[in-house]
Image (spheres, helix red, strand yellow):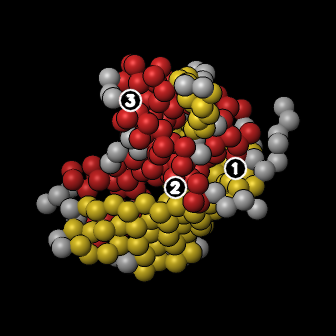
Amino acid sequence: MLNYTPPLDLVFAALADPTRRAIVERLTEGPASVSQLAQPLTISLPAVLQHLRVLETSGLVHTEKTGRVRTCRVDEAVLHTAESWIVERRAIWERRFDRLGAVLAETTD
Amino acid sequence: MSITRSTEYATFTIERSYDAAPERVYAAWASRDTKRRWFGDPESTPEAYDLDFRVGGLEISRGGPPGGPIYTYVATYQDIVPNVRIAFSHTIDAGEDRISVCVSTVEFKANGAGTRMTFTEQGVFLDGLDTPAQRQHGTNELLDSLGAYLAK
């Protein structure tokens, strides 16, 4: 039996940042070099590399250096784990508790 | 349509703080009329809702998105300590298929004038990764909703 808890935590932490989500979304279209990733993001190359390190640690992204070019690709299996049922279940309860908060706020006396 | 059989075990915890005393947060779980206001997805068409809030009592919620499968949630209340704790077991079916069997616990702790609520779900998720509904779920859409709740 696989224990998904530690990798899922890392994956969630990695995806909690909008820049890293943009990188992952770009990579779901296909592999890209670091400079290709940096271009639409309007952030510096070192900043992109820092985000890539977090994504690599989570297992979501693998990078490979050939000559001067570092190519990044998304790990479909890890992404698939992240998009599993559990994520959806959690999101369903999160939305419920938002609505509970709204109901409680309405009925304040 | 063939189904790939799989079982995946998971636990997750959600913590929330509300500006309401534990008695009021607990009441929102215990009252049928209050609970139906926040429990069901507003984008789903509700087909049935009932709550018999006592140990051994059942809660049934059935509904689904327009054109999608009908989800049936059935919970049995296993432990109730008013204003302190509720434990329940529940199953979810998508159409005719059972997709999860879980045990959930919600705890209420006074936090100043408000409440810290801790919800923990432990369960087995059945055949979940390979259902067509999962496949159709767009990766980018998922990343967005993931980001939305993680940003809170």
Instruction: Decide if residue B47 is in sight here.
Output: no
Q: Residues within 10 Å of mark 3 (few under 14, many from 20)?
A: some
Residue A107 image-quadrant placement: bottom left
- Label 1 Cα crowd, 10 Å radius (few <14 / some 14-19 / many 20+): some
Where is residue A72, by image quadrant? top right
Earlier residue among tags 3 and 2: 2
Query: Residue B119 or A39: which is nearer the viewer?
Result: A39
Dot 2: chain letter: A
Q: Do the numbered discs 3 and 1 sit on residues whose CB atoms are within 8 Å?
A: no
**Image position, residue A40 (x, y; %):** 39, 19
Is residue B112 shown to the viewer in this render? yes
x and y percentages locating residue B36 in the rendered image = 42, 51
Up/down of A69 relative to B95, above or below = above
Front in this rendered view, residue B21 or A20: A20
Kindly indicate whether the residues beneath marks 3 and 2 are on one polypeptide chain.
yes
Residue B103 screen position, x and y as percent: 59, 67
In front of the other: A95 or B137: B137
Q: Which residue is mark 1?
A: B99
**Distance (Cα) linking label 3 and label 1:** 44 Å
- Kind of residue indicated by mark 2: Asp
Q: Which mark identifies residue A45? A: 3
Quadrant of the rendered structure where residue B96 is? top right
Q: CA separation, marks 3 and 2?
A: 26 Å
As drawn, the label of residue B58 is none
The disc placed on residue A9 is 2
**Disc 3 and disc 1 on one polypeptide chain:** no
**Amino acid type of the residue tagged 3 in the rendering:** Leu
The residue at 57%/60% (across/down) is A6
Image quadrant containing the N terminus of chain B: top right
Residue A10 image position (x, y, % from top left): 51, 52
